[in-house]
Amino acid sequence: MRILAIYNGEYGQRHIENITQHAPPHWEIFTWKAAANFPLIIDYPEDFIPPDLPQADLVLSFAEQKGVAELLPEIAQRTSAKAVIAAIDNEAWLPRGLARQLRGWLERIGVACATPKPLCSLTESDFGVTRRQRISYHSNEISEFARHFGHPQFQVIVNELTRCIIQVEVQRDSVCGCARFVANGLIGVNVEEAEEKTGLLHHHYPCLASMGIDVDFDDTLLHVSGNIFKDELGEMIKPYKRVQYIAPGKRSED
């Protein structure tokens, strides 16, 4: 699969470095560093796109400027891309209204589009957009990418005597590489403390999702992302955690 990854800052650069390091050998990854600033209205997208972009099956947008989203339909056509993933880890970089427009623009030209919010909500069949809403998609290219990067997925081995984690296999990494970092930090941690430790590791990586309150979640996207990690890990260690039951006492006669 041929991938064109677009970035214009540290956020996207770290994603690209992780993908490049851990991608399957049959992937070809090309990059384009877009401009840091764009005019408020882009009348001619072709004026902002280099003429020598490579052909690609999938376009990844990690841009920190919403003007790049307006270029994506033209980029998809020029590169003959069949699908686009535009990350939303900050509402300022890709507002919800523009994300809806982008999905519509691309659908009209026969290009699949995923706008996962946050990026680590992406799975092989759908992605998150609000606290309670997920959008499904049908794209072999996006699914192929999401088999390796997106919603973190772990396989955990626990010592049943000590109830400490002895091995964590990352079955699907987050795009930024945070899942691998978290997995390495969980070795030797007791299952009762593992979810809290997961949240701390996620924060210390650090996650680059927005720390401003997002109205679609009534929370920061950084916290939403951290909860995705903690929930995933929690499911893996649930069989090993002790469940405490509280027996009701008898009522006093006095």
Image (cartoon, grey):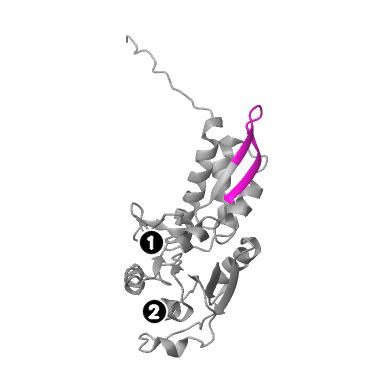
- The amino acid marked with disc number 1 is Asp
Does label 2 or label 1 sit earlier along the sequence?
2
Compared to residue 172, the image places residue 7 above or below, namely below
Indicate the position of residue 173 as horizontal and vertical percent values: 57, 55
Indicate the position of residue 214 as horizontal and vertical percent values: 38, 61
Taking depth in this image into account, of 166 and 60 the one nearest to the observer is 60
Residue 214 is marked as: 1
Question: Magenta: predominant secondary structure element?
Answer: strand
Indicate the position of residue 39 as horizontal and vertical percent values: 40, 87
Secondary structure found at label 2: helix
Residue lying at 39% horizontally and 61% vertically, measured from the top left: 213
**Residue that label 2 marks:** 70
Q: Residues within 10 Å of mark 2 (few under 14, many from 20)?
A: many
- The amino acid marked with disc number 2 is Glu
The image quadrant where one finds the N terminus is bottom right
Taking depth in this image into account, of 235 and 107 the one nearest to the observer is 107
Compared to residue 19, the image places residue 253 above or below, namely above
Which residue is the extreme one toward the top? Answer: 253
- Residue 139 location, quadrant: bottom left
Say if the magenta span includes residue 168. yes
Q: Is residue 247 visible?
A: yes
Q: Residues within 10 Å of mark 1 (few under 14, many from 20)?
A: some
The image quadrant where one finds the C terminus is top left
Q: Alpha carbon of mark 2 to alpha carbon of mark 1: how far?
A: 22 Å
- Number of labels in the image equals 2
Give, as a single range, the part of the protein colored magenta.
156-171
Say if the magenta span includes residue 71. no
Residue lying at 36% horizontally and 53% vertically, measured from the top left: 131
